[in-house]
Amino acid sequence: MKVSARVKVAFYVVLLAVFASDFFITREHPVFPWDRIPGFSAVYGFISCVVIAMLSKFIGHHGIMKKEDYYD
């Protein structure tokens, strides 16, 4: 097994452990209703990250980036 594959497996194990630990943590005073849902923050953060990456790629390709022959 290559080192990069080991690092990836270790990352997934840690990610699963952090996600699973959210089911065992009690929240004394949740501020918002979605604070009671276990794993909500992880799912919300992942979806937000994907949306930001896709939106920035869209803005970059359709507005900010110039063509390769811009200066020719």
Image: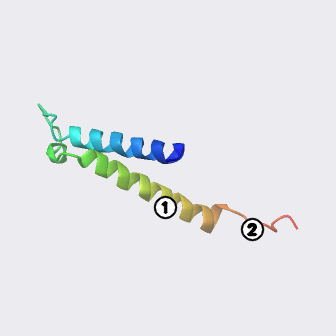
Seen as rendered, the residue at the extreme front is 1
Give the residue displayed 18% in from the left and 45% down from the top.
38
Q: Residue at x 22, y 42 (%)?
A: 20
Specify the amino acid type for callout 2. Answer: Lys
Instruction: Residue under label 2, please give it.
Output: 67
> Residue 67: which quarter of the image?
bottom right
Alpha carbons under labels 1 and 2: distance apart: 20 Å
Number of residues whose C-alpha sits closer than 10 Å to that of mark 2, classed few (under 14), some (14–19) or many (20 or more): few
Assign a secondary structure to mark 2: loop
Crowd rating for badge 1 (residues with CA inside 10 Å; few <14, some 14–19, many 20+): few
Residue 72 placed where, x, y %? 88, 68
* Residue 64 left/right relative to 9: right
Looking at the image, residue 8 sits to the left or right of residue 46; the answer is right
Viewer-closest of 9 and 46: 9
- The residue carrying mark 1 is 54
- In the image, is 66 to the left or to the right of 3? right
The amino acid marked with disc number 1 is Met
Please state the horizontal and vertical placement of residue 22, each as a whole percent of the image: 21, 39
The numbered mark, 1 or 2, whose residue comes first in the sequence reads: 1
Circles 1 and 2 in contact, beta carbons < 8 Å = no
Given residues 49 and 31, the one toward you in this image is 49
SS at mark 1? Answer: helix
User: Which residue is found at the position 36% from the left and 55% from the top?
Assistant: 47
